[in-house]
């Protein structure tokens, strides 16, 4: 009797149960949307890696992935103000890794051209706890010791922001490993040296004048500082020369505007290559870089002086640096360069 009553009750309530088909369909659609969104994020990070690599030419790891909602909204609004991209080049790949190349790429609001501002790796900056002073490249080491390059990037980004007073809109962490591959992929990078360089690692000789570097040569040259007149400062100047040459090469090949070339190059760099897009949507960054890259970039160095004391590092030159930093913050570098042409790193003739 009880069993019959239970069966009858279940039969009455079964009619009130909503059909499961629509519910299952909704779940399937939600899963599909999430998968597509994850794929868009991965591909977007890889595409922007190409932009960063086109500016400097190293491998990229993203500390701050873009928001999926930004990537799904097309067309993206193009930012109208200036942008600042921070690119960090790593020589070491073990626990002692430091940011040996620090390049601030300034994109002015008028999109006239890019300004490649090198900052000495031995710049003296306050330590994160504010109790002492250390070198700028060391700000990367401790946070990244566990392998989290994003943590190292964020620490160095904060130090650069405090040093310059400019907002960092996007950035990347890069290693020399991909320089070799990328340089070969684009057919070599043109570069002009004002003086000969001899490698202390391979004994290769780079003559003064213009030349085209393959991947192995590019990595070798970018590592050199011993034997150069201004040591690490000359190495940074050569890094900006390489950056300008790489940008010129991809521009002349039409890589940034050719989807086939861009896709092929992105694929060769691998699916793990991503960058920090900050708050700027990926399509907007691609649009800005492609437009600004049409003109030759101007390479500059943060005006510094060397301090011969315990830390043996650089500090901003009290005479020249304030005006430079004011111009950078106010997006008036064009006027500052016109008034101080001696501060521009010569690129040479092709």
Image (spheres, grey):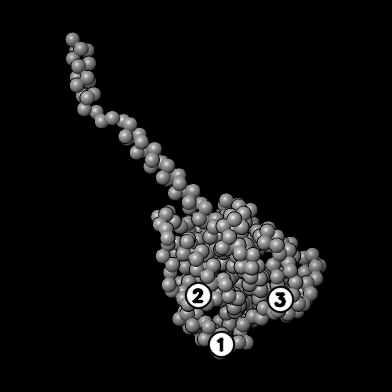
Q: Nearer the viewer, residue 156 or 69?
A: 69
Badge 3 marks a residue whose secondary structure is: loop
- Residue wearing tag 1: 338
C-alpha distance separating marks 2 and 3: 24 Å
- Residue wearing tag 3: 350
* Quadrant assignment for the C terminus: bottom right
Q: Tell which circle, 3 or 1, labels the residue nearer the N-terminal end.
A: 1
Q: Tell which circle, 2 or 1, labels the residue nearer the N-terminal end.
A: 2
Looking at the image, is mark 3 or mark 1 nearer the viewer? 3
x and y, in percent, of residue 62 in the image: 52, 58
Asked if labels 1 and 3 touch by Cβ distance under 8 angstroms, the answer is no
* Quadrant assignment for the N terminus: top left
Residue in view at x 56 percent, y 87 percent? 338
Asked if labels 1 and 2 touch by Cβ distance under 8 angstroms, the answer is no
- Residue wearing tag 2: 111
Q: Nearer the viewer, residue 139 or 171?
A: 171
Residue 326 drawn above or below residue 137? below
Residue 261 placement, left or right of 334: right
State the mark number for residue 71: none
Residue in view at x 75 percent, y 72 percent? 211
C-alpha distance separating marks 3 and 1: 23 Å
C-alpha distance separating marks 2 and 1: 17 Å
Q: Is residue 63 visible?
A: yes
Q: Is residue 159 visible?
A: no
Badge 2 marks a residue whose secondary structure is: loop
Q: Are there few (<14), some (14-19), or many (20+) residues within 10 Å of tag 1?
A: few
Badge 1 marks a residue whose secondary structure is: helix
Residue in view at x 19 percent, y 21 percent? 12
x and y, in percent, of residue 131 in the image: 49, 72
x and y, in percent, of residue 323 in the image: 51, 86
């Amino acid at each position: 009797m009880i069993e019959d009553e239970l069966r009858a009750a279940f039969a009455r309530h079964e009619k009130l149960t909503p059909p499961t088909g629509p519910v299952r369909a909704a779940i399937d659609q939600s899963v599909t949307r999430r998968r597509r969104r994850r794929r868009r994020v991965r591909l977007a990070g890889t595409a922007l890696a190409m932009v960063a690599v086109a500016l400097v030419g190293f491998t990229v790891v993203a500390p701050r992935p873009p928001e999926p909602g930004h990537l799904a909204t097309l067309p993206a609004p193009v930012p109208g103000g200036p942008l600042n991209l921070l690119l960090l080049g790593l020589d070491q790949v073990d626990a002692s890794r430091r940011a040996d190349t620090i390049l601030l790429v300034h994109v002015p609001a008028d999109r006239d051209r890019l300004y490649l501002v090198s900052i000495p790796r031995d710049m003296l900056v306050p330590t994160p706890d504010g109790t002492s002073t250390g070198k700028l490249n060391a700000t990367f080491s401790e946070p990244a010791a566990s392998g989290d390059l994003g943590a190292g990037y964020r620490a160095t980004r904060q130090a650069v922001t405090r040093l310059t007073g400019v907002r960092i809109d996007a950035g990347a962490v890069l290693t020399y490993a991909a320089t070799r591959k990328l340089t070969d992929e684009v057919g070599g990078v043109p570069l002009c040296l004002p003086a000969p360089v001899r490698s202390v690692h391979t004994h290769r000789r780079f003559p003064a004048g213009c030349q085209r570097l393959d991947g192995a040569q590019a990595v070798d040259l970018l590592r050199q500082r011993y034997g150069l007149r201004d040591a690490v400062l000359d190495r940074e100047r050569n890094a900006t020369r390489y950056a300008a040459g790489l940008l010129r090469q991809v521009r002349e090949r039409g890589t940034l505007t050719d989807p086939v070339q861009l896709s092929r190059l992105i694929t060769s760099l691998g699916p793990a290559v991503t960058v920090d897009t900050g708050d700027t949507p990926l399509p907007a960054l691609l649009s800005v870089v492609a437009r600004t890259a049409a003109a030759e970039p101007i390479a500059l160095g943060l005006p510094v002086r060397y301090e011969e004391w315990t830390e043996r590092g650089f500090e901003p030159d009290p005479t020249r640096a304030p005006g430079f930093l004011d111009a950078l913050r106010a997006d008036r570098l064009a006027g500052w360069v016109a008034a101080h042409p001696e501060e521009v790193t010569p690129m040479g003739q092709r």
